[in-house]
Image (tube, grey):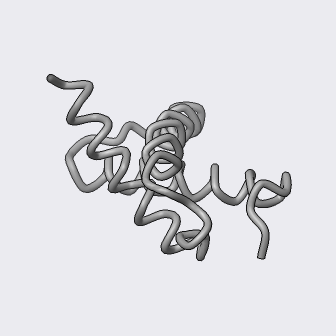
Amino acid sequence: MSWIVSLIIGGIVGWLASIAMKTDAQMGWIANVVVGVVGSMLGYWIAGLLGFAAVGGIARFIVAFAGAALLIFILGKLGVFRK
């Protein structure tokens, strides 16, 4: 059951990050879920390298959102998203 919740939260995080990065029109719901889940892992990994432990729901959401936005930025620089 927890993986279903992770996919749902990942979809929400990916969708919000795609809106913030202005790539929402280019991404479908599957891309939002993938970006949300992979971006969250990226965010937690970078936060761990910086010595930041996301404790609490809001801090965890911010780290996940920042990771997803960073992933969209990187994918945009690689040419995955066109403007």
Q: Which residue is pictured at 53% across the width and 48% down the height?
A: 31
Q: Which residue is pictured at 57% across the width and 59% down the height?
A: 69
Of the 4 image quadrants, the one containing the N terminus is top left
Q: Which residue is pictured at 21% across the width and 35% down the height?
A: 5
Please, is residue 43 above or below residue 1 in the view?
Answer: below
Please, is residue 64 above or below residue 7 in the view?
Answer: below
The location of residue 2, given as percent across then percent down, is 19, 25
Q: Is residue 13 left or right of residue 17?
A: left
The location of residue 22, given as percent across then percent down, is 59, 76
Q: Which residue is pictured at 47% across the width and 52% down the height?
A: 32
Q: Is residue 77 left or right of residue 44?
A: right
- Give the total of numbered labels: 0
Of the 4 image quadrants, the one containing the C terminus is bottom right
Residue farthest toward the left in the current orientation of the protein: 1
The location of residue 47, given as percent across then percent down, is 51, 40
In this view of the protein, which residue sits in the foreground, 49 or 22? 22
Please, is residue 27 above or below residue 25 in the view?
Answer: above
